[in-house]
Amino acid sequence: MTGPPAGQAGGEGMRPVAPTARDAAEPAVTAPPRAGLDTTAVLPYASSRASKRTRWLRAWMLTVPVDVAALLTPLLLSQNYWRGTLANGVLTVTVFAFGGLYRARRHLSILDELPSLCGRLLACGAAVAIIAAERHDSVPYVSGFMHDVALSAGLVIIGRALTRKLTIVARRRRWLEHNAIIVGGGPIGLELARLLRRYPQYGLRFVGCVDAPSRQQVGGIPLIGTLDELEALIPLLDCDVLVIADPDCPEASLMDSLLRPASAACNLWAVPRLWGSGSQGGYPDHVGAIPIVQIGDTTLSGPRWAIKRASDVVLATAALVVLSPLLLLCAIATFLEGGRGIFFHQERIGRYGRPFKVVKFRSMRPVDEHESQTNWSIAHDRRVGPVGRFMRRTSLDELPQLWNIVRGEMSVVGPRPERPYFVQKFSAEYPNYAMRHRAPVGLTGLAQVSGLRGDTPISDRTRFDNYYIENWSLWLDIKILLRTVAEVFRGGGR
């Protein structure tokens, strides 16, 4: 793909350059001097043919198979320790994944990774060796197993060194590169653009820069558009990566642009405002002398969504089986108090704004559908009987939603689903409210276990919901579930 038209990328009197692999390492293009501006402008350039076919590749696709092969190599030499070898392999890959060792990096160096690799390899090998010693109570057996662990650890390090070298060579020859838009046209953005153009080993092809309208005629980067146009530019330029440098706009405006669907699908990197800030991987990353950190996924998608969905299905199915006697008792109690129609179906808004029917045990009968959709709370409604009040206080009325989870309409943990009337109302009143629909809605959530239920500020709930989405982890879900159980036994429901 070629760069943007000259009128967009280079401004009046300048044309974008389409270099070869050698040209990509040349200094920035010099433009005619203009009053008050840097005389050196950095222009987008054409992509290589090979990179168009390799854009789907990700860092883990190379490192994971090599790590697995290295960890399982001892099985080719001896079958005596196959259980321990398999356990060590699974544990090590898992620890590597959660430790960020399969994340993409801009600066590749085995020496940077070595402390983290060695520490995790040693910890995993020691854990499996302790279990083996307990099971076999044999010094020769454990000694032989540790020889295999040491062999596999050495092969992992060698494999990492080789894959890093291979990746650097592929990047330098521009066989492997990803299109990147720099968000921010100030001095840092300009320097980043120059570095990416000069050093292709960082694996990013500079395709343009966007900023606020106030910076359209400032600096050495001819801007290809504004932040408001970023959503349209991403598919137009086949952009994979966004790099946040120094945009001339408030943080709220920047976040609004970055959380739109096309922007959220890109890998997000940022130059820390406070230089020296640590990165997610446990060791720093950089482009030239500019520190850079990868921002965690702002939506629940890709592998993170697969993990969450799998845990939801397992947990909800197990809960339906284990809690079936309790569900039966609740159904009988509801029938005895109010007769037929023990289940209450109500339209709610789920992920991406899609409506679905939530299922609950009925605690009262609304006068009509309008009351059902627009009545905010029935906590003090006299029509709620003793059984309904007890089930609401203990949240037992929510248990049928386990079926919604199995169907994929809900998650175990997530923002609570709301009715269409209130979604429309709150979205108009609170700018960040609609962002909570980036993730599947949940049976319980961080806002609920933090005391934000019933008549509590919607703005506070929105902040908690968006914080949960942007900082999701399996452990965060477990913590929320444990706090939910405590709330149920405390009777902290409505």
Image: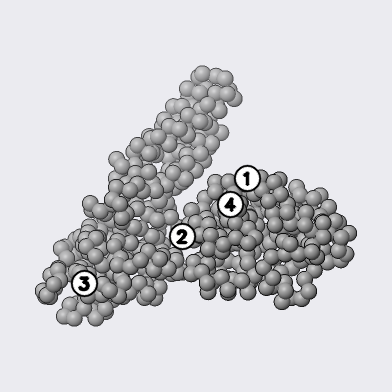
For marks 4 and 1 on the same chain, the one whose residue lies earlier in the sequence: 4
The residue nearer to you, when weighing 437 against 150, is: 437
Q: Are marks 2 and 3 in contact (CB under 8 Å)?
A: no
Q: Secondary structure at mark 2?
A: loop
Which quarter of the figure has residue 212?
A: bottom left
Residue at left offset 54%, top offset 46%: 475
Q: CA–CA distance between discs 2 and 4? A: 22 Å
Q: Position of residue 174 (x, y in %)?
A: 28, 61
* Crowd tier of the residue under label 4, counting other residues whose Cα lies within 10 Å: few below 14, some 14–19, many 20 or above: some
* Crowd tier of the residue under label 2, counting other residues whose Cα lies within 10 Å: few below 14, some 14–19, many 20 or above: many
Q: Nearer the viewer, mark 2 or mark 3?
A: 3
Q: Secondary structure at mark 1?
A: helix
Q: Please give the residue where the numbered disc 1 appears in the rendered image.
A: 482
Q: Secondary structure at mark 4?
A: loop
Question: What amino acid does circle 3 point to?
Answer: Val
Residue at left offset 40%, top offset 60%: 267
Residue at left offset 76%, top offset 76%: 368
Q: Nearer the viewer, mark 2 or mark 4?
A: 4
Picture disc at residue 450: 4
Which quarter of the figure has residue 406?
A: bottom right
For marks 2 and 4 on the same chain, the one whose residue lies earlier in the sequence: 2
Q: Position of residue 338 (x, y in %)?
A: 86, 63
Q: Can residue 23 be seen in this snapshot?
A: yes
Q: Nearer the viewer, mark 1 or mark 2?
A: 1
Q: Nearer the viewer, mark 4 or mark 3?
A: 4
For marks 1 and 2 on the same chain, the one whose residue lies earlier in the sequence: 2
Q: Please give the residue where the numbered disc 3 appears in the rendered image.
A: 218
For marks 2 and 3 on the same chain, the one whose residue lies earlier in the sequence: 3
Q: Is residue 465 left or right of residue 317?
A: left
Residue at left offset 65%, top offset 60%: 454
Picture disc at residue 298: 2
